[in-house]
Image (tube, grey):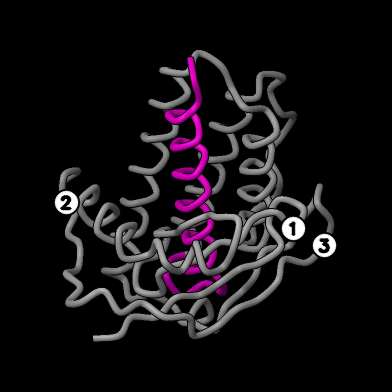
Amino acid sequence: MPHAIFVETGLDAGSTVAAYAAELPGCAVFASSDAEAVGAMPRRVAGFTAWLRSSGEAAPTFIGDNWYEVERGAVRGTPKVPERVTFSLDELPPSAAEFGSYLGWLELAREELAAALDAAGGAPTKALAGIVRQDLASAVLLGSAAPGAAPSDPIDRLYVARDHLTEALERAGPTADGVRRIVRLAIADDLRVAERLRESPR
């Protein structure tokens, strides 16, 4: 059975391509080429669903490994302030049950990133700043005002932005514009940085 992939080009000033599993918001592969990103999707989906189940979350079962690209878009904006791609499925509001699951997945992704930061004993400032920027921009799209003065510590800023986004999502609910996209990016980016930290030599 075929399964859809969305491809986002132009990340990291053009050096990175992201492939997203359309049926699993937050399940993504980041690679140097679109062929590499798309080709790695079956293994990524298997790992992502196993991670969800091991954490007590329900996860769909996918039959076959026929994952193929159905849509692509390029990051706009600037390298410092990128404007991430919105795909057609991002416009479809999730059901209330799906929304509840996605919030649970987002919390798990945060826990993965927090654990990786603790183990690494340091913070990749640039990567965390990107997550903070994306989270705050997403919260504004959901109708939330920007939080007050940001803490000076990059990890503290991350947690403030994450809490702000969670509150915005909970207030907005599943029918708010762009909810699926916001959750997709937040989960994918958290897991990406967590994996980078774990792969870095101590």
Question: Against 173, is 64 above or below?
Answer: below
Residue 53 marker: 2
- Vertical side of 85 occupied by 54: above or below: above
For the stretch drawn in magenta, what is the main secondary structure? helix
The quarter of the rendered structure image containing the N terminus is: bottom left
**Which amino acid, mark 3?**
Gly
Other-residue count near label 3 (Cα within 10 Å), few / some / many at <14 / 14–19 / ≥20: few
Q: Identify the amino acid type marked 2.
A: Arg
First along the sequence among labels 2 and 1: 1
- Do the residues under discs 3 and 2 have CB atoms within 8 angstroms? no
User: Which residue is depicted at the point 80% across and 51% down?
Assistant: 79
**Local secondary structure at mark 2:** helix
Say which label, 3 or 1, has the lower sequence index. Answer: 1
| Tag 3 and tag 1, C-beta contact below 8 Å | no
Q: Position of residue 38 (x, y in %)?
A: 46, 69
Disc 3 target residue: 77
The amino acid type found where label 1 is placed reads: Gly
Q: Which residues are magenta?
A: 173-202
Q: Is residue 198 magenta?
A: yes
Describe residue 15's horizontal placement relative to residue 79 as left or right: left
Question: Which residue carries the number 1 mark?
Answer: 14
Residue 137 image-quadrant placement: bottom right
Marks 3/2: CA–CA distance: 37 Å
Q: Residue at x 42, y 38 (%)?
A: 110
| 146 or 180: nearer the viewer | 180
- Residue 50's x, y, as percent? 20, 52
